Amino acid sequence: MPNSKEISLAVIRRLPRYYRFLDELKQQNIYKTSSKELSEKIGLTASQIRQDLNCFGGFGQQGYGYNVDELYDEIGKILGLDQQTEAILIGAGNLGRAVTNHMDFVNRGFKLTGIFDQNPELVGQSIKGIEIMNTSQLGAFFYNNKPKVAILCIPKTVAPAISQSLIDLGVKGFWNFSHCDIVSTNSNIVVENVHLSDSLMTLSYKVSQLK
Amino acid sequence: MPNSKEISLAVIRRLPRYYRFLDELKQQNIYKTSSKELSEKIGLTASQIRQDLNCFGGFGQQGYGYNVDELYDEIGKILGLDQQTEAILIGAGNLGRAVTNHMDFVNRGFKLTGIFDQNPELVGQSIKGIEIMNTSQLGAFFYNNKPKVAILCIPKTVAPAISQSLIDLGVKGFWNFSHCDIVSTNSNIVVENVHLSDSLMTLSYKVSQLK
DNA sequence: TAGATTGTTAATCGATTAACAATC
DNA sequence: TAGATTGTTAATCGATTAACAATC
């Protein structure tokens, strides 16, 4: 199981994809699959899928394949989706609101418990039943709650300072939408960067290579 | 220059990062840098940075380093940011609106010229000065405009059908926020997937590995 | 049993890093 | 010139693919 060896990030990033396709099979009431079938659906080699899964243990049965429900649950457990890590949103602007409304946090391993913004006009409004608080209330909030993760939807200019103060308050992970890289001086902090701007530039490159 | 060999996607994905850090240097009025200095700022090896840049030509000067402004412009050109590819948004829900308001399309190689949604309540409203049109008007719009790229902020259920009809209308690239993989039967289509859900699950894994 | 498909080892491929000659 | 730093080749490392024995 996890923590045993050291699984490469490349493997981990493929797991949500497997999870997604297994969910589709579930919805079609297909209860059995094989690395070959998955490879055709997902567009990877069967060999890679077997290698990936075997990082975590033997979920299949020789001569048979994989049980869809079982494999789905196992991958969910590996990804920690059976837990709900407490998370807060910092920055309730356009992007923060959209992310909050859009994501199914509970089924992705998180529970959103607080939303914060510096703009007094937003404070008091609610998103998904959670009232937006003033950033100044962060200290008090952490006194009563222990959110482990912060979702950063704040301008790049304030991101370094705010992320540092969140670390000081005890945050251990960031889902970072700011156009900057959060660097952890402390190594016990995990970061998942979503660089939309970088992604758009990559698309620009791909488009420019067409024809 | 581009198109010559075959540049790996791993290299391309680092270019926006270089671009970002060079922009910072520009803003600090620093006009000269070196692979060593960049490597410390960005957190990659100097060797890799030199390798990456040399995929596209020698932008540096031995014994001196790189001219910040020049390198910034060159990377911008490689990424095609000196062009503005016409793009449309499909789906003006929470996420679509946020992306539209949030992104600086012009400086990322694109020009947003149309927004479409199926919801009649949204049609007629404007985002960033662009009026939301009904999806039924897509044909007419393509008759007058030739958008090359579509930004998909639509539910996964309708994504396959809509992306196919957009391909039929002449779209050559997708920035896909739907929770599904756009697969191009036709190989002349480029796709950049933004799987927020996958990213969140990856964070869940990282958090679960802490301590 | 025969057929199928896994789990796993070995081979290949590609990407990163190291080293150094070229040269500003 | 001496020092610095690139451009580039060679060495290393890691990830993907192929092959096959194990076994259901």
Image: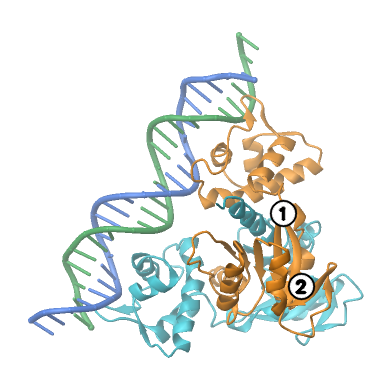
Chain colours: A cyan, B orange, C blue, D green
Quarter occupied by residue A87: bottom right
The answer to whether one can see residue A49 in this image is yes
Q: Position of residue A172 (x, y in %)?
A: 65, 67
Quarter occupied by residue D7: top right
**Parent chain of label 1:** B
Total numbered labels placed on residues in the image: 2
- Label 2: which residue? B97
Left/right placement of residue B147 relative to residue D22 reads: right
Q: Amino acid at mark 2?
A: Arg
Please name whichever residue, A112 or A3, is drawn nearer the observer in this view of the structure. Answer: A112
Element carrying mark 1: helix
Residue A33, placed above or below residue B60 = below
Residue B182, placed above or below residue B57 = below
Quarter occupied by residue A170: bottom right
Of labels 2 and 1, earlier in sequence is 2
Which residue corresponds to the image point at 40% horizontal and 84% vertical from the top-left?
A68
Pointer 2 and pointer 1: residues touching (CB < 8 Å)?
no
Q: Position of residue A30 (x, y in %)?
A: 40, 88
Q: Are marks 2 and 1 on the same chain?
A: yes
The answer to whether one can see residue A184 in this image is no
Which residue corresponds to the image point at 71% horizontal and 49% vertical from the top-left?
B83
Please name whichever residue, A7 or A141, is drawn nearer the observer in this view of the structure. Answer: A7
Q: Position of residue A98 (x, y in %)?
A: 74, 75
- Label 1: which residue? B108
